[in-house]
């Protein structure tokens, strides 16, 4: 791969980050396909999907927490050095992603009836923002793993 020689900020290779992004996006596409296949059609539509089906931020935030926890357990069992600063930032990001972020989304991104507000490109601005924040949280956990495992 052409990017194999480039180093990402923090010492990890760009390749690992790009692989993570590709897997994350492929998983999201597969989730949408499976949701579409498994649902009956909505009135006036040829599918049963809604805009909310594009929200993956909860999955990605939880995946980041599991990835970080697994990295910490394996690193400690193998007595590998931990990048303390990156671990601390990632832990803070995960805690905020599981506490303050959902509350903020509730305040600004949802209207009454628990429906996400239409805004921005394709009326999915809040979905892109929520997924973008969670994507950064997930990538922070990947960076910790790359730093630990080299």
Image (cartoon, rainbow, N blue to C red):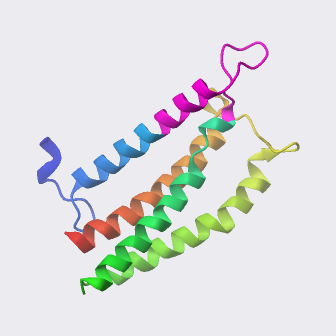
Position of residue 49 relative to residue 69, above or below, is: above
Residue 86 in the image, given as x and y percentages of width and height: 37, 75
Q: Residue at x 46, y 57 (%)?
A: 136
Q: Quadrant of residue 114?
A: top right
Residue 107 in the image, given as x and y percentages of width and height: 79, 56
Q: Nearer the viewer, residue 38 or 140?
A: 38
Q: Residue at x 27, y 63 (%)?
A: 9
The answer to whether 52 appears left or right of 142 in the picture is right
The answer to whether 91 appears left or right of 117 in the picture is left
Q: Quadrant of residue 43?
A: top right
Quarter of the figure that contains the N terminus = top left
Q: Quadrant of residue 99?
A: bottom right
Q: How many marks?
A: 0
Q: Residue furthest front?
A: 38
Is there any visible trace of residue 112 in the rendered image?
yes
Q: Residue at x 33, y 65 (%)?
A: 143
Residue range of the region highlighted in magenta in the rendering: 28-51
Position of residue 20 relative to residue 139, above or below, is: above
């Amino acid at each position: 791969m052409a990017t194999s020689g480039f180093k990402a900020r923090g010492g990890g290779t760009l390749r690992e980050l790009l692989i993570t992004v590709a897997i994350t996006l492929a998983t999201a596409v597969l989730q949408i396909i499976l949701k579409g296949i498994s649902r009956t059609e909505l009135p006036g539509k040829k599918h049963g999907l809604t805009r909310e089906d594009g929200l993956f931020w909860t999955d990605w935030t939880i995946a980041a927490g599991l990835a970080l926890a697994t990295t910490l357990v394996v690193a400690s069992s193998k007595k590998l050095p931990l990048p303390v600063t990156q671990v601390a930032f990632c832990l803070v990001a995960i805690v905020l992603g599981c506490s303050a972020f959902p509350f903020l989304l509730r305040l600004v991104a949802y209207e009454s009836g628990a429906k996400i507000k239409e805004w921005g490109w394709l009326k999915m601005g809040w979905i892109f923002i929520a997924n973008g924040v969670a994507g950064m949280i997930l990538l922070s956990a990947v960076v910790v793993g790359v730093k630990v495992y080299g």
